[in-house]
């Protein structure tokens, strides 16, 4: 007990000397429980409470309630909540998690930061502001100038907060925006932190992003090599297998582009059969892939059904939902179903602010 007391006093003294933290900096770090973030039968997170003493793009260091210093890898962190943060910040996180970006932005705008002195809380608010600006720039119909502005918000966040735990995610978002802008060569620079990380699932995400760039540019051999490298990775964790499923969808698109749509459809259907119902984004991407390849194969009715799956079952996967709705507008129009076409157009306009010509 005496040793424990001395240890607590040592850490307290170090914190005061360095001016790093006080009791007001106490946080709850919600850690992913292994693969449980994607496992409906497991506890999704476990709270690690303590006081943050350091932060980097890869590790968050805290002293827990037993006065033990712990380093938590960023890839294990679901979210960080601070004792002194504005109550509205929890609402912002929830709105983002459920895809309600407009609600999140409106709530965030009302938060008064003038009385906040804690560095990490201010950084968290700054990240959410940049994140929401970037998400808005990803909506279809945005101009190159608007997309660049969204990317700049993230770039400015990284520049101002280079040691924040969101930095790798921020780089990935900039990469996605550069792809959307049509500058895939620039995007490669921002996907590099993913590929250079020590975490297999992050490396896989980076390789898939690069493969997608090559596929869009019809560099099919390069794309296939990158997708196959993901599939051949030794990591068999659930998170790694999730990335391998995305790689299979990429290979399915490669097959379709090479003139083998039936092979692509078979590969995509296999992903759908093996994916879990909780993998909302993966399932939405898979059905959109099924729809796109069906169109290439001249199977418009099958394509229609695939896109309807996304609309009816996976509307929370916002980017994929928008893609599916845009395809449905065209397909309903071709079938002369003006009422259904009008309904989808209205959904795009009211929910996402997207107008379809």
Image (cartoon, rainbow, N blue to C red):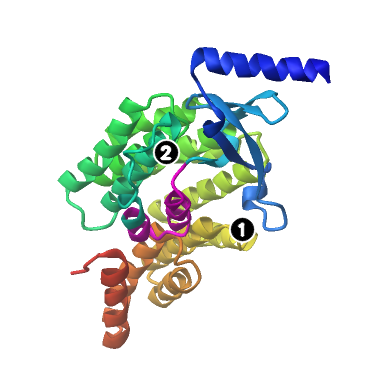
- Sequence-earlier tag: 1 or 2: 2
Q: Which residues are magenta?
A: 85-105
Q: Nearer the viewer, mark 1 or mark 2?
A: 2
> SS at mark 2?
helix
Q: Which residue is mark 1?
A: 275
* Image: 316 above or below 58: below
Image position of 28 (left or right of 216):
right
Measure the C-alpha gap from mark 1 to mark 2: 33 Å
Find out whether residue 311 is within the magenta segment: no
Q: Say which residue appears at 67% left-offset and 58% top-offset.
A: 40
- Residue at which label 2 appears: 124
Task: Let me know if residue 100 is in the magenta part.
Answer: yes
Residue positioned most to the right: 1
Look at the picture and state if 292 lies above or below 52. Answer: below
**Residue situated in front as seen by the camera: 196 or 350:** 350
* Whole-percent x, y for residue 63 in the image: 63, 26
């Amino acid at each position: 007990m005496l040793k424990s007391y001395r240890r607590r006093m040592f850490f307290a003294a170090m914190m005061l000397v360095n001016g790093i933290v006080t009791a007001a900096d106490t946080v709850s770090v919600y850690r992913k429980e292994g693969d449980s973030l994607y496992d409906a039968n497991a506890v999704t997170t476990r709270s690690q409470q303590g006081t943050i003493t350091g932060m980097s793009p890869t590790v968050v260091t805290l002293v827990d309630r037993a006065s033990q210093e712990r380093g938590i890898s960023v890839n294990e962190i679901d979210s960080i909540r601070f004792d002194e943060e504005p109550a509205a910040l929890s609402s912002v996180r929830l709105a983002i998690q459920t895809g309600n970006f407009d609600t999140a932005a409106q709530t965030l705008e009302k938060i008064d930061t003038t009385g906040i002195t804690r560095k990490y809380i201010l950084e968290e608010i700054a990240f959410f502001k940049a994140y929401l600006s970037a998400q808005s720039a990803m909506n279809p119909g945005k101009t190159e100038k608007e997309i660049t502005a969204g990317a700049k918000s993230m770039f400015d966040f990284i520049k101002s907060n280079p040691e924040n735990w969101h930095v790798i995610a921020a780089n990935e978002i900039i990469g996605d925006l550069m792809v959307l802008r049509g500058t895939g060569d620039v995007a490669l620079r921002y996907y590099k932190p993913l590929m250079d990380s020590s975490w297999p699932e992050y490396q896989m995400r980076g390789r898939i992003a690069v493969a997608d760039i090559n596929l869009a540019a019809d560099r099919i051999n390069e794309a296939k090599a990158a997708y196959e490298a993901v599939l051949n990775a030794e990591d068999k964790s659930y998170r790694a297998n999730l990335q391998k499923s995305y790689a299979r969808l990429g290979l399915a698109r490669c097959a379709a582009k090479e003139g083998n749509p039936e092979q692509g459809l078979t590969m995509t259907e296999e992903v759908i059969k093996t994916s879990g119902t909780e993998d909302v984004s993966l399932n939405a991407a898979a059905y959109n892939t099924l729809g796109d390849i069906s169109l290439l194969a001249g199977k418009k009715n099958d394509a229609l059904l695939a896109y309807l799956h996304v609309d009816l079952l996976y509307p929370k996967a916002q980017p994929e939902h928008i893609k599916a709705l845009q395809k449905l507008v065209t397909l309903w129009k071709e079938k002369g179903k003006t009422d259904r076409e009008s309904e989808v157009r209205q959904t795009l306009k009211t929910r996402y602010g997207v107008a379809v010509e």
